[in-house]
Amino acid sequence: MTNRAMTTTRRSFLATGTAALAAPVFIRGARAQEKFVCKIAHTEGIGTPITNAFDAWAKTLNEKSGGRIDAQHFPAAQLGGLAEALEGSRIGTIQVTTAGPDSEEAIAPEIAAFGGAPGFIYKSEEHVDKVLQGELGQKCSDIARAKTGVEFVAYGETGFRHILAKRPVASLDDLNGLKIRVPQLRIWVDFWTLLGAAPTPLPYSEQYSALSTGIIDAIDSDVFSIVGFKFHEQADNLTLTGHWFLPKAVRVNAAWLDSLPQDLQDLVRSSAKEAFAEQRNVNRANAAKTLEDLKGLGVKVQSLPKEELAKMEEQTSKLFDEFGSKSPETAEMIKAIRALG
């Protein structure tokens, strides 16, 4: 064999051998798909429309990702209260939670108004949709991403909030001195203070026990949460006021989302929008039925008279200017939201 032939043979062997060695590595890489754990943790009650939506969404993420996303759902404060869930979503110890945009009052006051602050800002469900499902909703998400490290990939809702109390509330006079639980946010304290109540900031998870022990006399809540957390066992007077509509931003840690391959990023965003569009439909369709369920559980339900509701709105209206004074951007957002109503 000539030297040239030997050289050609060695080259052929080396090329073949190199390919043979590389092939198993390629196959192993294709088979060993990287998994991305997605912990979904929040404080919403078991069986509520928003918790059911997270159940459905987690299933969709697991199935449509082909197992590449491992979505794990922990509702009802299983991994901690709202403060822990918010902090976890910001730093990435959990990947997803939900809360009203008003939770960002301290960090991004200009988007807090999207969470219903400072009360009576949303006039109807149609108004909510115009705001959150349009350009303003996207702007809210962009600001949240820039300032808090989370992206609002969709908006669910728990609906309008009402007063659940141990004693009947039939007028504004009945609010005087009423110890009502509020989130640990300044705007909620100011709202109830203007109405003569005694707002008591408490974590969401402590409401039931606080009603039981008398630390508080009342809470404000959507009807689904009253049933889901059995608050009606401790307070059985429900006054329909609709003073605050609470959207729920589906908050995804931005760094985690950015770490996903592009197809999985698209899946997270698109499937969230689908799941929570359905959640909003279910929430609205079932609100009246849930109210009837509460009556069947012994809850006494009444509507606040229109003239009293008008007084309630008038007495808290100054908060629009006060809240807007936090920054020009905040005032602009409040104006834009109200203009769509």
Image: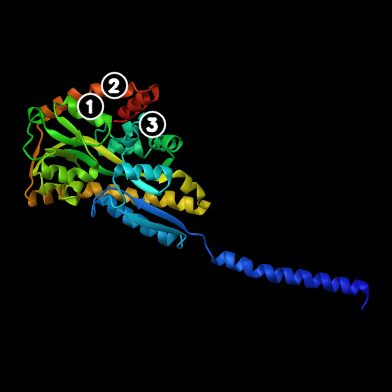
The residue at which mark 3 appears reads as: 108
Q: In this view, does 136 lie above or below 55?
A: above
The residue at which mark 1 appears reads as: 190
- Amino acid bearing label 1: Asp
Q: Is residue 249 visible?
A: no
Q: How far apart are marks 3 and 2 (CA)?
A: 15 Å
Quarter residue 143 falls in: top left
Give the mark nearer the N terminus: 2 vs 1.
1
Horizontal side of residue 173 vs 12, given as left or right? left
- The 10 Å Cα crowd at callout 1, few under 14, some 14 to 19, many 20 or more, is some
Q: Distance between the residues labelled 2 and 1?
A: 10 Å
Q: In this view, does 52 lie above or below 216?
A: below
Mark in the foreground, 2 or 1: 1
The residue at which mark 2 appears reads as: 322
Quarter residue 117 falls in: top left
Give the mark nearer the N terminus: 1 vs 3.
3
- Amino acid bearing label 3: Ala
Q: Secondary structure under badge 2?
A: helix
Q: How far apart are marks 1 and 3 (CA)?
A: 18 Å
Horizontal side of residue 282 vs 251, given as left or right? left
